[in-house]
Image (tube, rainbow, N blue to C red):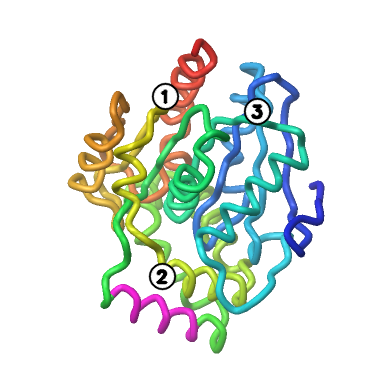
Amino acid sequence: MKKAFLNGIDLAFEEIGGGRQALLLIHGHPFDHTMWQPQFEPIAELGWHVIAPDLRGYGASDIDGEMTTLDIFARDQIALLDHLGIEQAVVAGLSMGGQIVMEICRSAPERITGLVLAATFPQAETELGKQQRLATAERLVTEGMTGYAAEALPKMLAARSIRSHPGVAEHVLRMMRSAPPAGAAAALRGRAERPDYADTLEQLDRASLIVIGDEDAFTTREDAERMHTLLKGSRLLWLPGVGHMPNLEQPQIFNAALADFLRRCAAG
């Protein structure tokens, strides 16, 4: 992995391929850049420059402070693009990563040529949701990640995926267990304060792909249809039997849809 000192921290990132067109992959909570491994080589082989960072507080990246809001995450990603000399990129994010993509769309839409939103939703946190995130943050700091990871696995992957793809389940469990508790807690506190991104999506004029599994414990069909309506001209891929991690649970279908989308983005 490479590292760059950006916005006061060392940010770790992986680069695959050296194409002229760039794809920035933003992982979710509580994972790291290896969440996107099934996408690295297939997309690089299409001639794309693939960049996959560890978000601050996750993986090999540093943490600074007890709360990491989505705008801080977004500024890190923009700083990384600047560091790499990339003016514009297609930006893809899953779950919290998707909300970071939305924040980039809000704050720096000129940097985005297309967006992929997987297993995510645009609405602000509810009061109950805030309380739950803050309580979970304290639990992670006190207890660590092991118990949380075991409880979260059945929500991250569909039951069928856990049974039929034990290697994927182990990868997801390993990422969650190894996530730094302080970094994961800081992100939970920040995400509790997230704004609503409906207006941002409605005003955006960019090619977009939405990918949702029908067994996602966090994102509903209503969420998917709402984003599809807000994002003019978007494509919605609805995957049966898939949970919260479609890129890992059905990588061939996900990669085919992503490759087709990237071809359309490259064609302008």
**Can residue 133 be found in the magenta stretch?**
yes
Circle nearer the N terminus (1, 2): 2
Q: Which residue is mark 2?
A: 193
Q: Residues within 10 Å of mark 2 (few under 14, many from 20)?
A: some
Q: CA distance from mark 1 to mark 3?
A: 15 Å
Residue drawn 21% across the image and 39% down it = 225
- Above or below: residue 256 compared with residue 174: above
User: Disc 2 on helix, strand or loop?
Assistant: loop
Residue type, numbered disc 3: Glu
- Above or below: residue 211 compared with residue 258: below
Majority secondary structure in the magenta region: helix
The one nearer the camera, 258 or 206, is: 206
Q: Residues within 10 Å of mark 1 (few under 14, many from 20)?
A: some
- Percent position of residue 150, x then y: 45, 70
Q: Nearer the viewer, mark 1 or mark 2?
A: 2
Residue 257 — which label?
1
User: Disc 3 on helix, strand or loop?
Assistant: helix
Q: Which residue is mark 3?
A: 41
- Percent position of residue 245, x then y: 42, 47
The one nearer the camera, 195 or 15, is: 195
Q: Which residues are magenta?
A: 129-139
Q: Nearer the viewer, mark 3 or mark 2?
A: 2
